[in-house]
Amino acid sequence: MLKPNILVLGASGNVSHSVLFHLKKVRPFFADFFLVDKREFIEDKYINLSDLDCKFINLEVNQNTSDKFLEILRENKIELVVDLSNAPTELVSEIVFNYGKASYICCSFCSTNNLSLAENLNKINTRKRDITLKMPHIFFTGMNPGIVNILVEMGIRKYGIPDQIIEMEFDTSQFLNSQNKKIVTWCIEEFIHELMIDPTEIMLGRDKYISLHPNALFHCENMEKLLSPIWKYDSYPNGCILSHEECVTLSQRYDIPFKFIYSVHSSTMNYLKTMEQSEVKVVIDNLLLGDNFNNPLDGSDSIAVRLEYEDKNIYYTNSLKNQDIIGGSATAYQVTVGVYAAIFSLIFDEYQPGIYYPEELAETLYPSYVCANLEINECVMNMNTKKQKWSNIKCKNRKKSNVEINIV
């Protein structure tokens, strides 16, 4: 797939700002470039249509416009669709599948139905077995899901299948010049859905999960025992148990429990809990977007996954400061690396047609792109002696890429 015609859906969003900022550095590796979004594209000093040498199309992809979107793919001979939108994933992917001449990449599962995440992903798993698919596609690649998946896969290949997996994320981001604001560093709408609208789930193993009602804010755990062995904070938050794609796909793959615990800055978390207790609906305008390009951010986003064995815990970690990032937040950059890894793995690797999850890409260039653009550390903790052994993860892949893999 050398020099594909590429289309980015959801191009006006916060995460896409970071993705496009870094993709413009490798613009020569694409032919025609198209951006699609239901909102207007806003240019700034980091990205503009001229630098990207692209065409913007104002369109909301839904059931009523599916024929129009398919027409765009056909007329422009699109070969790669990168979906950064919150349009229904099943709808967009089926349009691309029916078109049959483009690979599809998405970061997460978005839906308007009332099914659980596990039920929705079972439908994707059924589609994975469809031998009529004509192109390779990578689903759920960002940081989490995405990079976390490949780190778990690397750990399991090295140490074996654990008894259970716990993932944790603590985003301490705040405005550099105005502390204690209620901010979110990625999509506010999806943030509200994950924490306050959708019931959450805990995966217990293959085809086994429990649904927790009414939402994630009602199901919290103190994160000190999880985080204190690897990161020191003045205080540790009560994190929400969230449903996430990587919990489902990895629990299904290895038939083990998988739980994700998440917290942002206390100002935002306390506000959400107060609103929930008073039964006041939180809307998008109640929260501020911490994009790190209009308003510089302090703090960091720290993500870790722990593989638990009888005699040891294996941590894989990445902690990224907002002040070290240009063109987006630390959170957005972490997602960008997962998207970038998927794009260039598809371009420079040989894939058979079908749907792939990131944990299935250990033998591709995907992990090399990840480790070249994020500092990934491994901590082996002996549960008997409490001794720790830290090391930096470098992926030595059997394949060579003929594209510069550093986007930093």
Image (cartoon, rainbow, N blue to C red):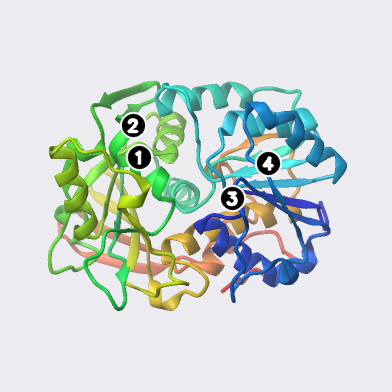
Q: Which residue is mark 4?
A: 104
Kind of residue sitting beneath label 3: Arg
Task: Give the label on residue 194, or none.
Answer: 1
Q: Is residue 107 visible?
A: yes
Q: Is residue 182 left or right of residue 88?
A: left
Q: Could you tell which of marks 2 and 4 lies nearer the N-terminus?
A: 4
How much space separates mark 2 and mark 1, taking CA atoms?
6 Å
Estimate the spatial distance between the alpha carbons at disc 2 and disc 3, rounded to whole Å: 25 Å
Residue beneath disc 3: 39
In the image, what residue occupies the spot 64% across and 26% down? 63
Which percent across, then down, holds residue 396? 59, 64
Q: Are marks 3 and 4 in contact (CB under 8 Å)?
A: no
**First along the sequence among labels 3 and 1:** 3
Q: Secondary structure at mark 4?
A: strand
Q: Which residue is mark 2?
A: 198
Side of 407 relative to 161 (left or right): right
